[in-house]
Amino acid sequence: MTTLLDKQPLFIHLSSLTTSRGLYEHAAYDQVRKDHGYCVDDVARAFVLLCHQANKDLEMESLQHVYLDFLLDAISSDGKCHNRMNVDGHWTDAANVEDCWGRAIWGLGVGAVYGADRTMRARSLEGFHALTKNLSSNRMSLVFAALGAGEVLLMNPTEEGAREVLLAVQGLLIPCEIGSGWIWPEPRLRYSNGSVVEAAILGGWALRDMKLMQDGIHMLRFLVEVETRNGHFSLTPPQGRGPMDREAAFDQQPLEVAALADAFARAWEFTGNPRWPHEVKRAWDWFLGSNDLGVRMFDPLTGGGYDGLTANGPNLNQGAESTISMLSTAQRAMELQAFFEVA
């Protein structure tokens, strides 16, 4: 598939962005920008990545512990979540129940199930319980939280905090047709769209709500159709995409590819439809150059992901979000590599 997958994804750049305190958010090219500090959004993604990583070495295990400590420290006494920490280790924002809250629940839920050892799983579950004492009213915050809550509820059907999160998001994931074939819960695609689909599939499975799960599969087919152009993925840009916006648009974010790959892997897990592993491969191919400009979107020597696909080419900065997105997509492709070899 590519030399990056011959052995395993390279975590060199992710490691270079990480200190004993956390994961720096931004980089100028491959150099850390310490002035921007750390954020829960990226640390939660990195923790999920390493919880799913097979054959971790000692350095990866060390990173995983750093990320868990950071997530737990972000939880306030009232069960809300900080997001931003400065270079000196001080939280600079008020604790809230917005996207960082949802992503922290996602990370800790995955850690509670897939953490490296019993202690990590127990600490993750404790943090998960603390955060799920609150509920957000924000759709995307609940979508991210559902990705952790679904894992926890599948592990233990008596986990009421996990069930409450999934019930809260359940009614927000109902697709509605707007115009001709626009099958989505909102009139425009926004960001991390694959996460919306994955939340529906996983949440439907965990709640035994087969209609929600099937709605998720229908939305995934719709999303593939809308985000495919000339055989490759042409992603929804940060400004969103509506029913009339079918041409290529920029700046496309690697996060969108990673969310798609996660949704495809989840659809494969729960349906066994061979279409979905092939879509995972198409997601990885986007990083290899099967995109609107035909350019590679990562540094194969370090494992640093480029920050976005602009109209003029890659944004060569290699921040945490884009690096994790690339590594996560490569990880999904590796998990299904045996399928490609026999398919």
Image (cartoon, rainbow, N blue to C red):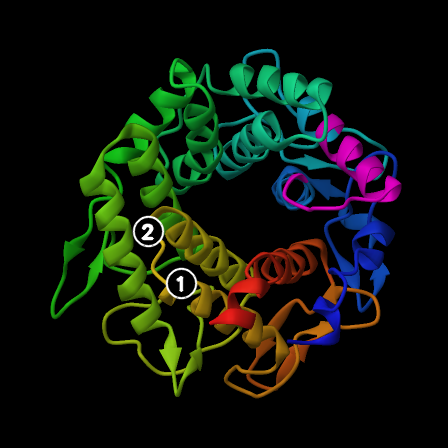
Side of 179 where 80 appears, left or right = right
Picture layout, residue 49 above or below residue 104: below
Where are the magenta residues, as a range? 51-69
The answer to whether marks 2 and 1 mark residues whose Cβ atoms lie closer than 8 Å is yes
Q: Which residue is mark 2?
A: 271
Q: Position of residue 4 (x, y in %)?
A: 74, 69
Q: Residue at x 39, y 48 (%)?
A: 198
**Residue 135 occupies which quadrant of the picture?**
top left
Three-letter code, disc 2 = Thr
Picture layout, residue 42 above or below residue 83: below
Q: Position of residue 334 (x, y in %)?
A: 62, 61
Side of 62 where 228 appears, left or right = left
The CA distance from mark 2 to mark 1 is 9 Å
* 278 and 48: which is toward the camera: 278
Side of 250 where 315 appears, left or right = right
Picture layout, residue 126 above or below residue 3: above
Is residue 59 found inside the magenta-colored segment of the image?
yes
Picture layout, residue 49 above or below residue 98: below
Q: Residue at x 73, y 30 (%)?
A: 70
**Residue 40 occupies which quadrant of the picture?**
top right
**Secondary structure state at the residue bearing disc 1:** helix
Three-letter code, disc 1 = Trp
Q: Is residue 193 visible?
A: yes
Q: Is residue 91 visible?
A: no
Q: Which residue is mark 1?
A: 276
* 46 and 131: which is toward the camera: 46
- How crowded is the residue under tag 2: few (<14 C-alpha within 10 Å), some, or many (20+)? few
Is residue 312 found inside the magenta-colored segment of the image?
no
Main SS, magenta region, reads helix
Q: Earlier in the sequence, mark 2 or mark 1?
A: 2
